[in-house]
Amino acid sequence: KAGVTQTPRYLIKTRGQQVTLSCSPISGHRSVSWYQQTPGQGLQFLFEYFSETQRNKGNFPGRFSGRQFSNSRSEMNVSTLELGDSALYLCASSVDPAKNIQYFGAGTRLSVL
Amino acid sequence: DQQVKQNSPSLSVQEGRISILNCDYTNSMFDYFLWYKKYPAEGPTFLISISSIKDKNEDGRFTVFLNKSAKHLSLHIVPSQPGDSAVYFCAASAIKGAQKLVFGQGTRLTINP
């Protein structure tokens, strides 16, 4: 069974640009969550989607948005990039909300210059 | 406000001995706790979890202990192996909050031969 797949693995953008990251969950998993990892702030929750609906949202500005498609694949978009958006963006999928066990992809490393 | 804290940024243990990683939390609404292991350039890998109705959960070499009154949990690895060298993250969630995981800052475990 394939794991969580994130594309691309690496991205370099400049300030002011926008970026879209993609996540394909484990087959059968309907919940997809996104996290940002930085050296200073650690792993922080961005948002979670289930059946194409955003169910939870973390404390990030509106420049960070996402969506989920009918096949459970998810995309995350960051507009008007800032230097501080440089981070590892991780996607996780889950099949059992009651246990909250999430399985992570390898992440997308975004560098904003 | 750091709701989940791992106060030891690093830990060094001799191969074959016990590794004990600690985690404290402040939010009494948390009722499900997880440990993840992370290698460089990979996403976090789920290790073991525990519900707040239990005080111990064991899986092979890994045991997690939960002390609700002290809001403290620990991960024991016995015996420690060189492949256990990684960064370990403690995470917590409130089941009613669905898939939002709150992570600690991580502890880098090094197993010395």
Image (spheres, coloured by chain):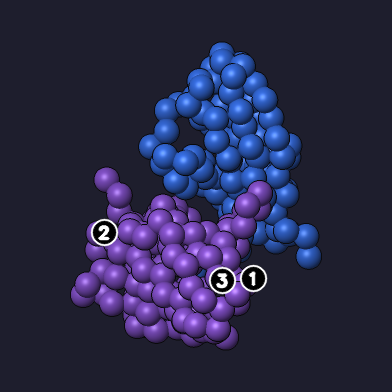
Q: Quadrant of residue B32?
A: bottom left
Q: Is residue B29 visible?
A: no
Q: Secondary structure at mark 2?
A: loop
Q: CA distance from mark 2 to mark 1?
A: 33 Å
Question: At 73% across and 37% down in the image, what residue appears?
Answer: A8
The purple-tinted chain is B
Rendered location of residue A12, percent (x, y): 67, 25
Q: Are marks 2 and 1 in contact (CB under 8 Å)?
A: no
Question: At 34% across and 77% down in the image, what residue appears?
Answer: B66
Mark 2 lies on residue: B27
Which callout, 2 or 1, points to the residue nearer the camera?
1
Q: Earlier in the sequence, mark 2 or mark 1?
A: 2
Question: At 78% across and 65% down in the image, what residue appears?
Answer: A1
Mark 1 lies on residue: B83
Question: At 62% across and 32% down in the image, what residue appears?
Answer: A110
Q: Is residue B35 visible?
A: yes
Mark 3 lies on residue: B112
Q: Earlier in the sequence, mark 2 or mark 3?
A: 2
The blue-tinted chain is A
